Amino acid sequence: MLVERVCEICGTKFFRRRYEIRPRSPARFCSRKCLGSYIGQHYGFPVHRKIGKKRKWDYDEIWKLEDKTGWGPSKIGKTLGIPIPTVSMILKKRR
């Protein structure tokens, strides 16, 4: 049975199965993009910037987070909603 939901970020109506709905579930968002926006807003980190027509990850912020916490690419990627291979590539460019 499907339950109608409203996305917390963009306000779009969408449907989820009843068993997918939990208080901290990603079923509160209509897409991965909205989930990433939520993570970026609530963890004080801009997930990405729009530069021209392309989107670019904020390299400086990722490097600062690595210096501050000592986390690896997996933990940084999960926390910020950025793909782990992308975080690995960004951290390798620094070295």
Image (cartoon, rainbow, N blue to C red):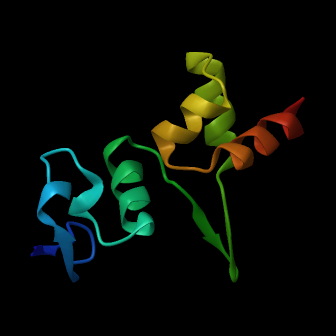
Residue 56 or 4: which is nearer the viewer? Answer: 4
Q: Is residue 26 left or right of residue 72?
A: left
Rendered location of residue 56, percent (x, y) = 69, 63
- Vertical position of residue 18 compared to residue 7: above or below: above
Q: Is residue 68 left or right of residue 40?
A: right
Q: Measuring 66% from the left and 56% from the top, which residue is drawn there?
A: 57
Q: Is residue 90 left or right of residue 64?
A: right
- Vertical position of residue 7 compared to residue 81: above or below: below
Locate residue 6: give its quadrant.
bottom left
- Vertical position of residue 53 compared to residue 67: above or below: below
Q: Measuring 33% from the left and 56% from the top, which residue is drawn there?
A: 38
Q: Measuring 27% from the left and 76% from the top, which residue is drawn there?
A: 10
Q: Measuring 52% from the left and 54% from the top, which residue is drawn there?
A: 47
Image quarter in which the N terminus is found: bottom left
Residue 48 or 7: which is nearer the viewer? Answer: 7
- Vertical position of residue 83 compared to residue 8: above or below: above
Rendered location of residue 52, percent (x, y) = 70, 80
Image quarter in which the C terminus is found: top right
Rendered location of residue 39, percent (x, y) = 38, 49
Q: How many marks are shown on the rendered structure?
A: 0
